[in-house]
Amino acid sequence: MAEKFHAELASLKGDVLAMGCLAQGMLHRSMEALRTQDAALIELVARDKQRIADQDHEIEQKCLRLIALHQPMAKDLRTIAASLKTITYLYRIGRYGKDIAAVVPELADAPHAGGLIGIPQMADIVEGMIADALVAFEREDLTAIRGIEEREEAVDALRYSILRECLACMTENPETIARCTNYIMIARYLERCGDHACKIAEKAHHMVTGERIEIR
Amino acid sequence: MDNSTILETRDLNLWYGQKHALIDITVRIPKKTVTALIGPSGCGKSTLLRCCNRMNDLIDSSRITGNVLFNGEDIYDGHADAYAVREKIGMVFQKPNPFPKSIYENVAYGPRIHGVREKGALDRIVEESLKGAALWDEVKDRLHEPALALSGGQQQRLCIARSLAVEPEVILMDEPCSALDPIATGKIEDLIIRLARNYTVVIVTHNMQQAARVSEYTGFMYMGELIEFDETSRIFEDPGEELTENYITGRFG
Ligand SMILES: Nc1ncnc2c1ncn2[C@@H]1O[C@H](COP(=O)(O)OP(=O)(O)O)[C@@H](O)[C@H]1O
Ligand SMILES: [Mg+2]
């Protein structure tokens, strides 16, 4: 029984990782769509919204079943707890991807101001944080999330500079107000995605060590 | 030894003939708490429990070194009386073992031996003990029926009432639920938690969830040694020893 349970636990982690890839893909595609105005990408992200909701449900179900049937202890229990929390964060990351993709058409009428003023750079860091938090979770390798706090700070700083640049842009040229408001919102979403990556890293840390940390 | 420790072993070793069954066990059992002992079969849980009230005296081949202190006094000291010890430190076994007498007589048995003769006093003790064991409401109208007519779970609670009747301080329980169905088990678990308001309970259990549910402290034993002793939440959420982790997560052998 214990053997079967541990096999199921391993497969649960695989499912969480797969959901992570989906969430990350949604965010990545939304950024690609933002850059390229590729309508097909927007379509893909919109479609993934249902898939990620389904995965969220399925994994939650699986966790509840494992708890009910095996009443796990210690690290096994922490793994399930970390999985339950992680899928919530992943679901939100996916949703932000969808929300970003949804505003892309509104930005179609003119070229991007200031080469998207730091948004792609911010997205790169955030995607890296998510990837590393997932590696830490999947491989139980906490070296992957070392320094995630500094990256989180870099993301915050970028968001602030994007905000200032947008303000300057809007004051200078009121026609950019609608466009810049969207940039500000996207930067806000990306920052939230970075926060979620940190929460995933915290859960991975708790799963591996039994100790709770707070990343900022 | 501090005030909150009621029972303590110091470098306790026990042999059954050549078999070294307990190895350097040093543990302090806190007063008015539930302490659980867990570990694989044959690791020495029952042996340790029996050492705590000198039940091992009854096994000829057994030999011990080290100390077992009850309220600071060595129970293996030449002056200590094994019978007196077994009253202060009662024991409940895996299989309920009521005497083939009435419910009333089972509980009154101990006090009678102590010379309580007066019927009113005995009645009071029987009622209090049965209430203490959460059995009174179920048997108050049939106190003179045979104890063996009770269900398994009721018999186990009767055995607990019997041990309460002689005013113990500690109650040792050796897998008290393993012969019971889940509902009877649930009642005993509730009872154990309630007993800890007035008594100290040490319970051996094979069921880790049971240990997690009822106890405040847990000791994990392995091959005669006490590997880890800590707050139950710590043992089950994040044990300090890898052996403990492997045992409670079923990664053993
Ligand atoms: N009366 C006895 N005579 C000889 N060996 C015994 C006796 N009782 C127990 N043992 C041995 O001592 C070890 C510990 O037994 P026990 O305390 O009953 O373990 P547990 O309760 O953890 O299953 C086991 O190896 C068992 O075989
Ligand atoms: Mg035993």
Image: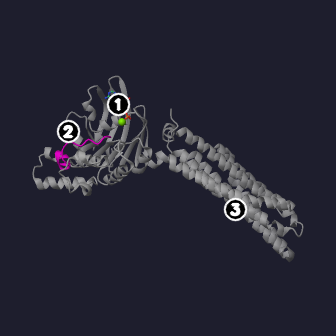
Closer-to-camera residue (B37/A214):
B37
Query: What residue lies at 62% left-to-right and 49% top-to-bottom?
Result: A204
Q: Is mark 2 within 8 Å of ligand 1?
A: no
**Disc 2: which chain?**
B
Q: Is residue A175 above or below residue A118?
A: below
Marks 1/3: CA distance?
59 Å
Type of amino acid at the residue the image marks with label 3: Arg
Secondary structure beneath label 1: strand
Question: Is B27 left or right of B99, judged from the image as shown?
Answer: right
List the residue tagged with mark 2. B83
Residue extending furthest front? B149
- Circles 3 and 2: CB atoms closer than 8 Å: no
Tag shown at residue B13: 1
The image position of residue B180, as x and y in percent, is 35, 45
The image position of residue B223, as x and y in percent, is 42, 31
Q: Is residue A51 above or below residue A5?
A: below
Type of amino acid at the residue the image marks with label 1: Asn
Marks 1/2: CA distance?
22 Å
List the residue tagged with mark 3. A192
Residue stretch in magenta: B94-109
